[in-house]
Amino acid sequence: MKRLGLKLGLVMAVVVLMVGGLAGCGASELGADTSTKRGGVRYSIKSKGTKFNIDNVTLDLYYGHNYTNPTSTFQYNYEKHEFVSFALYFCDGQYYQSNYEFELPFFYTTPRVYSDYTDVEGHYLVKELSLDEFSSGEYYVKFNPIFGYKFNHRETITVPRGVFERESGSFVFKVAGVFSLKDDGGEDYGDGGYIVLNSNCIYVRYDYVDEQTILLSKPNDRLR
């Protein structure tokens, strides 16, 4: 019995070491998702390392949604707006803005309008997805109350060097809904153009180690 107990103990010790070793080999989470509810667009950014050459900040990016119609996560007026695409952007955190501009004295809000959504200040457009593409099962995210979010979609992507503008700060990845303004959009929209609606985003902190090296970490708050 003593030998059996000793063998069982050794087996359990080996299992614990194996599990610990496997866990240590996995990529760690670097991003802080700003979502405050289960619905909407969700994100995760992972990497096995945290120190990168400025020209090769390559990360594993997970993202998707859990809606039947993903446009429902963006509030817009069907009479004035036409859906264009889902645009994927990187930007330095200082350029991340709310969807609306506030005007005094009554805090009247108007949507931010852009003449060209592919050329938003400080933003790097990664790619665009159609409604059919983003509605497919490839981009569906399943929530489990015990294990959290399970992403179907993952891609490896290199963050543009120009995103890292400051000595330290954060950068943002986001999926935004792009909508064109109809000709009869009304006086709120001036001469027309596009609105780029943010649902939420994911932040990653960065610090320069030297001119060619960036250190990434998960932010404790929504550092801009």
Image (tube, rainbow, N blue to C red):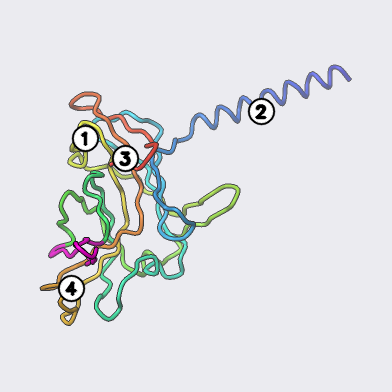
The correct choice, above or below, for 18 with respect to 161 in the image is: above
The kind of residue on which mark 1 rests is: Asp
The boundaries of the magenta stretch are: 100-116
Question: Which residue is disc 4 drawn over?
Answer: 188
Q: Whole-percent x and y of residue 139?
A: 42, 59
Question: Which residue is disc 1 drawn over?
Answer: 55
Label 1 SS: loop
Quadrant where the C terminus sits is top left
Q: Which of marks 4 and 2 is in front?
A: 4
Mark earlier in primary sequence (3, 4): 4
- Disc number for residue 15: 2
* C-alpha span from label 3 to label 4: 32 Å
Labelled pair 3, 4 in contact (Cβ < 8 Å): no
Callout 1: few (<14), some (14-19), or many (20+) C-alpha neighbours within 10 Å?
Answer: some
The kind of residue on which mark 4 rests is: Asp
119 with respect to 203 (left or right): left
Quarter location, residue 70: bottom left
Q: Whole-percent x and y of residue 59?
A: 34, 40
138 with respect to 167 (left or right): right
Mark earlier in primary sequence (1, 2): 2
The kind of residue on which mark 2 rests is: Val
Q: Whole-percent x and y of residue 144?
A: 57, 53
The correct choice, above or below, for 15 with respect to 165 in the image is: above
The correct choice, above or below, for 115 with respect to 211 in the image is: below
202 with respect to 187 (left or right): right
Labelled pair 4, 2 in contact (Cβ < 8 Å): no
Callout 2: few (<14), some (14-19), or many (20+) C-alpha neighbours within 10 Å?
Answer: few
The kind of residue on which mark 3 rests is: Leu
